[in-house]
Image (spheres, rainbow, N blue to C red):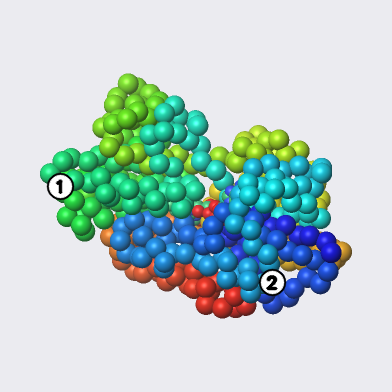
Amino acid sequence: MKRLLLLGGGHAHLRVLADLARARLPGWEVVLVTPTPRQIYSGMLPGWVAGHYALEQCGIDVARLAAAAGVRLLLDSAHALDADGRRVETGAHGSLDFDVLSLDVGSGSPAHAIPGAHGHATPIRPIESFVAGWVETQAKLRPGRPFDLVVLGAGLGGVELAFAAHHRGQREGWSHLRVHLAGSGATPLEASPPSTRGRVLELMRQKGMPWHGGRRAAAVEAGQVLLEDGAALPADACWLATGSAPHPWLADSGLATDAVGYVRVHDTLQCESHPAIFAAGDVASLRAALPKSGVYAVRAGEPLSRNLQAACRGLPLASWQPQARALYLVSTGSRHALAVWGGSSWEGRWVWRWKDWIDRKFVQRFNAGAGARP
Ligand SMILES: Cc1cc2nc3c(=O)[nH]c(=O)nc-3n(C[C@H](O)[C@H](O)[C@H](O)COP(=O)(O)OP(=O)(O)OC[C@H]3O[C@@H](n4cnc5c(N)ncnc54)[C@H](O)[C@@H]3O)c2cc1C
């Protein structure tokens, strides 16, 4: 019996599992290694922080999907990969050999890049740890005592989480909670059209959320964040949303990686250096450099699934041409959101309802019936 090893329960692998539930691979044992039986959907995480969703509404039942697909689930993490030896080292399950490997492990946290962040900041990844961190932070919010939360990093995740925490504070009557957003760019969401960036700043001003732009964080200490120009921001809590970083164990795997350390793949999602290994989502680096975003991780699911099935059956692989542009929906705390498509943007409560519908549908289509076509 040959073995297809799926590493990580990320967006693309959800599709692989759903497809395997409909068409199994005769003669192959399929094993999924991922640390948690549930995958919290990042698109709904700010809505959970804001108080719009219960956590259960944001979770995809990976264990159920795996069971329906006849896939052996090992709740574990890989800490080493030997691409030449076709072996993955895990924490509790030891060494796992494979004939074909698929990586959808997302990206790691860049916490090591800022001195002190490791001990004094809460990275937004892994999401399960962030969830525990926000629950702990809420317990520390004492009425009458000012509490400053600094969100470091003003990309999509940082902006949405800052607005969400502010909204939660308003909703719960935590008038002593002040949410700061800090980023190295002149405005938040630097990759967005000027109208979107201007609107984000305007909304922050209206809500009384300070913006600390144009400076990088130099260090995170107990009670404060130091910026590179010497300014110190009071910080009873600090969230680290400064982007993504490749998992460190990829560096010693023998896989060809890009300059940052992500795995280089052909447009078949096959690794450039090792044809029996595939990668999709944040961990993969295509020639058409894609943003690290859930949109592309989801889109990669269908071609990954098709090509894994083909590789295991000895059939030819097909190329994937990712879409050139993606729609981004940015929630702004209350049930309001901005939509960004290329150089255009829109906003309103209707955008939030649209986002809410898309996000719920994404989660439900995997939870509703493991065999349902995503
Ligand atoms: C707060 C927030 C909001 C966001 N909002 C959006 C948005 O609105 N739109 C958008 O396009 N993008 C958004 N993103 C980005 C998006 O979440 C990521 O780009 C996307 O999750 C990447 O998907 P993935 O499948 O590559 O990996 P992930 O979804 O990160 O999944 C990786 C999986 O691998 C597992 N894993 C990790 N390490 C190991 C290991 N060593 N061994 C085994 N398993 C492992 C993890 O537990 C997880 O199950 C947001 C991110 C955050 C944090």
186, 45: nearer the viewer? 45
Q: Quadrant of residue 13?
A: bottom right
Please provide percent x and percent y for residue 278. Answer: 73, 53
User: Residue, x 57% and y 46% (percent of image)?
Assistant: 107
Mark 2 residue element: loop
Q: Is residue 313 left or right of residue 8?
A: right
- Report crowding for label 1: few under 14, some 14 to 19, many 20 or more residues within 10 A (C-alpha): few
Sooner in the amino-acid sequence: mark 2 or mark 1: 2
Whether residue 281 can be seen here: no
257, 56: nearer the viewer? 56
Q: Is residue 141 left or right of residue 50?
A: left
In the rendered image, the vertical position of residue 140 relative to residue 352, given as above or below: above
The circle drawn on residue 143 is: 1
User: Residue, x 61% and y 37% (percent of image)?
Assistant: 248
Whether residue 10 can be seen here: yes
Please provide percent x and percent y for residue 83. Answer: 77, 44
- Is the C terminus in the top left, top right, bottom left or bottom right quadrant? bottom right
Mark 1 residue element: loop
Amino acid beneath label 2: Gly
Q: Could you tell me how far apart the alpha carbons at marks 2 and 1 are, in whole angstroms?
A: 51 Å
Please provide percent x and percent y for residue 182. Answer: 35, 37
Q: Is residue 307 left or right of residue 162?
A: right
Q: Which residue is mark 2?
A: 70
Q: Quadrant of residue 100?
A: bottom right
User: Residue, x 45% and y 34% (percent of image)?
Assistant: 118
